[in-house]
Amino acid sequence: VIVSELTERELVSRVHRRLPPSPPWLTVGIGDDAAVAETMRNRLEVLTVDAVIDGVHFDRRFCPPDAIGHRALAVNLSDLAAMGAEPRLALLSFALPPDLPVADFEGIVSGIAVLATAHRLTVAGGNLTRTPGPLAIDITALGTVKRRGVLPRSGAHPGDIVYLSGSVGAATAGLAMLQQSAAGADQSCVTRYLRPEPRVRTGLLLSRNRAPSACIDLSDGLADGLSRIAEASGVGMAIDADAVPIEPGARTWFERHQQDPRMAALDSDDYELLFTVRPRLRGRLRAAMQHGGVPLTRIGVCTPDHGIALRTSDGRELTALPHGFSHFR
Amino acid sequence: VIVSELTERELVSRVHRRLPPSPPWLTVGIGDDAAVAETMRNRLEVLTVDAVIDGVHFDRRFCPPDAIGHRALAVNLSDLAAMGAEPRLALLSFALPPDLPVADFEGIVSGIAVLATAHRLTVAGGNLTRTPGPLAIDITALGTVKRRGVLPRSGAHPGDIVYLSGSVGAATAGLAMLQQSAAGADQSCVTRYLRPEPRVRTGLLLSRNRAPSACIDLSDGLADGLSRIAEASGVGMAIDADAVPIEPGARTWFERHQQDPRMAALDSDDYELLFTVRPRLRGRLRAAMQHGGVPLTRIGVCTPDHGIALRTSDGRELTALPHGFSHFR
């Protein structure tokens, strides 16, 4: 069965069936002109939208439907995490090619529903339309944050320490393994590409303790994240390339393909958090270190000059990072 | 210049430049991982998302860029109006083909910006991505409403009077005129297709006076709107087809093409409001009648049975409406 054989109402009911019951604060849910929700007292609202498109952000040939849904929501949850926000609700907008199997559509919705439930996010509404183009999923996510807990990109000062959650490289290596259907692909890299875990809990703990001076997520890669914090804050950075944690399976993959893992991991779109902390406030990281579920590693320091220097541990300059000015391709 | 020759940052700055300054309640605007906004005390939040896609919802061959932007936002404002909500903010998600002229992109943004400003809606953020498919614009809009002012679809009772704002038919006729580049096209029909005016003010006044028992917007046409209120409320409807106001230019167009205007206007996606009112509360319509800027016309009555009968003024049955179960095409 393909989606053009069903009515819009039938497709909506397939979505509805995969979602948990609505919470009481959702006054009007799926099925009216718009959703209606109560707001939370004394909290600011955090809003983000991201689209994923077949052939650009994923590939139906090797991404299972539930992974497509997972990734579509994860990119939004990662943005909320980077602001220190607690996820609250999402709106799902699907552009469906008429020949998409209904089973694939249901799989995508299930991937979204499972990740949403894990993060206590309610699907409040959405939109379905057909498209003559590729499958596209556009998700808007809303979260809440206390006024003093917002984590912007722009607060880093010279001397602040640069931290990274988890490890990088797995997304780039995992995608390459899937594209080349490599025998002996490293399963942890493939899983981290297909079903990245947004660092929501770490973001919440960092926000609660007001530890970071600046924070961003790495959905466009480490090099881009470093540039954006540096630019928004008006600082430079000295990064120790040998201190950046690289996923072991990714390191092996890069080396086997004659790439320097320290360089290859720079553009990997792992859903990690990059943030800066004033040295005297380092103690505030304790809760996030102990309960965030993922290591936090010191990878460098902010500098007064405006460049980003990537150096080896013995002081050799590896590269000066480009400032993210690639064309819109 | 086409969009693939610019960087994402340059494209974002082209958007930013066309928007008015941010209001103080927008704590973090365009340019961070997510937007941050204060919420309004004692009001519920209304959320809606809608996508428009080239070749499905508009056609770049005869829709000027600013009209594409206008329509993309109008469909969302119409949803807010149908809930009785006051527009507050929007997130814009664009999927851009690489060969789209930058001037067209800017024109679309300008069309959105002009309509947003007219309705005091703030563009708080968004997303840009390239697409190998057609141009697509996905807009999420948020509004606010008082708890007792929500206008759902589901509150109609037998005996309630059915009202329609403005007139119908102009969208269908205007689109046909553009498609056939008809000489002597009726300018008011063409304008109403290209730049529909969402009935935000009427929706606000109806909500403030708690006049309607049910309300919906006609972005899927009058037949669909009647069916959806009837189904959600568990009522039937007897509609006087001769009482439905049809745009004069559209009536002429339909007659010239051997169509019964009363039937042809049923599927026209004019951005009007359809709502029901208990007979003894009719007086509450006065403010919306006087200050909504658009006439409100009585077109029928809700019935205890479950069908929708469309009759001429002399009592002949024109048609029994289908229940919106067309396939997802």
Image (cartoon, coloured by chain):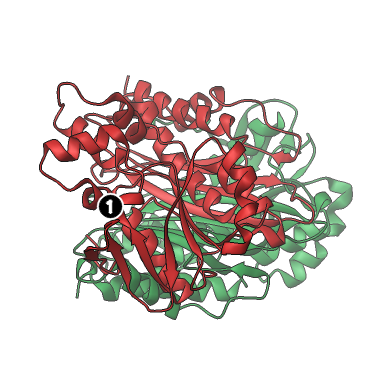
Chain colours: A green, B red
Q: Could you say which is closer to the camera, residue A281 or residue A57?
A: A57
Q: Quadrant of residue B322?
A: bottom left
Q: Quadrant of the N terminus of chain A?
A: bottom left
Q: Give coordinates of residue A135: x percent, y percent.
A: 29, 57
Horizontal side of A69 relative to A284 (left or right) equals: left
Q: Quadrant of the C terminus of chain A?
A: top left
Q: Give coordinates of residue A38: x percent, y percent.
A: 70, 63
Q: Could you say which is closer to the camera, residue B108 or residue B305?
A: B305
Horizontal side of B75 relative to B26 (left or right) equals: left
Callout 1: residue from which chain? B
Q: Residue furthest left?
A: B258
Q: Please give the residue where the numbered disc 1 appears in the rendered image.
A: B267
Q: Residue furthest front?
A: B314
Residue at 62%, 57% in the rendered image: B211
Q: Is residue A312 visible?
A: no
Horizontal side of A72 relative to A204 (left or right) equals: left
Q: Give coordinates of residue B126: x percent, y percent.
A: 52, 42
Q: Is residue A30 visible?
A: yes
Residue at 47%, 67% in the rendered image: A31
